[in-house]
Amino acid sequence: MSSIDEHVVHDGKGTARTTRCRHCNKVFASRSKGRWCQHMRSCGSLPPQLRHYFSSYEHKRYARKPWNPSATASKSEPPTSPTLSSNTESSPGSPIAGAAGVNDTPSSPIATSAEKPGENSLLRASDATLGSGAATDFLHQSSDDITEVLLIHGPCSFTRNSWTGKNVSKADLLREVRDMAVDEEISLVTHESNHEGEILDWLLNSKESEVIVLCWLGRLSDSPTILRALELINNSVIVVSPIGVNHGTLPSIVVGVMSGFGQQSLSLALAAAKNLNAQR
């Protein structure tokens, strides 16, 4: 037992263990021996000769090898390759006469890995659906045959990570919609926001070839800025509401409203977008 441990008392075990001074019963807030020694230097219950001992006491946390600067410098310096001096004349019997420079050695063969390069992570899916034959055929289709859909979930579409009005989680809903898009050979882009300003940017910056599926929980006629944006773009728009909503008068580019069909609303909207693209 070290000298400092002879002057402290440990009570309890584990995280509940406390340490106090054996002489004045002061409980230490820290388990650091340095703090214990600091207390011993000023403890009035400790004899003066012991306090003098703790004034020169130094606790060594762990031993280290002494630092050798010469050894460090020798390791850091790269080995130098021998070179031929241009002023040195070699005798005819010298083994290096007429030979090429020392540095003119053939390069070593490059080692190549036998493993195949990893697949493109953008083409890998988190489930077996995107690895199916339908997904493979979809990736090899021409851009003219692909139906492009911009799916926007508007304000209050999700409540506590569940689709508002229906007993389905947000993650399950997005996964089902993604799987349906692969089965229907649809290129799907999904956005979600509770701010109409962001939705305006998505609508006004949408591609002309995209069919817009707008999920709107409340009355769309109560959002005049959204209606104005729909009037400015030339896309086909399908409005989806999981619960029955009367949206009022809508712009002419709104080709359909799926209201009150629950989860089936999105599958109907994707099928309608597929038909619209085929009629172009």
Image (cartoon, rainbow, N blue to C red):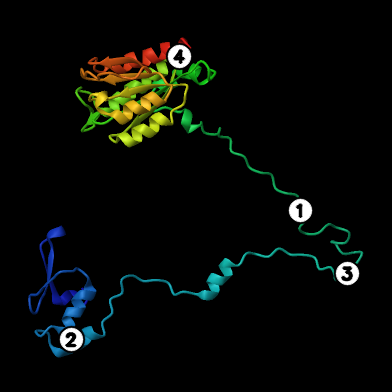
Q: Which residue is mark 2?
A: 51
Is the residue 193 above or below the residue 217 in the image? below
Residue 264 in sight here: no
Report helix, strand or loop for mark 2: helix
Tell me the residue at 72%/49% (across/down): 107
- Work out whether mark 1 precedes mark 2 in sequence or the reverse, and give the earlier one: 2
C-alpha span from label 3 to label 1: 21 Å
- Work out whether mark 3 precedes mark 2 in sequence or the reverse, and give the earlier one: 2
Q: Are marks 3 and 2 in contact (CB under 8 Å)?
A: no
Q: Which mark is residue 277?
A: 4
Q: Which mark is residue 89?
A: 3
**Mark 3 burial class by Cα count in 10 Å: few <14, some 14-19, many 20+:** few
Tell me the residue at 9%/79% (across/down): 23
**Mark 2 burial class by Cα count in 10 Å: few <14, some 14-19, many 20+:** many
Report helix, strand or loop for mark 3: loop
Please state which amino acid type lies under the numbered disc 2.
Arg
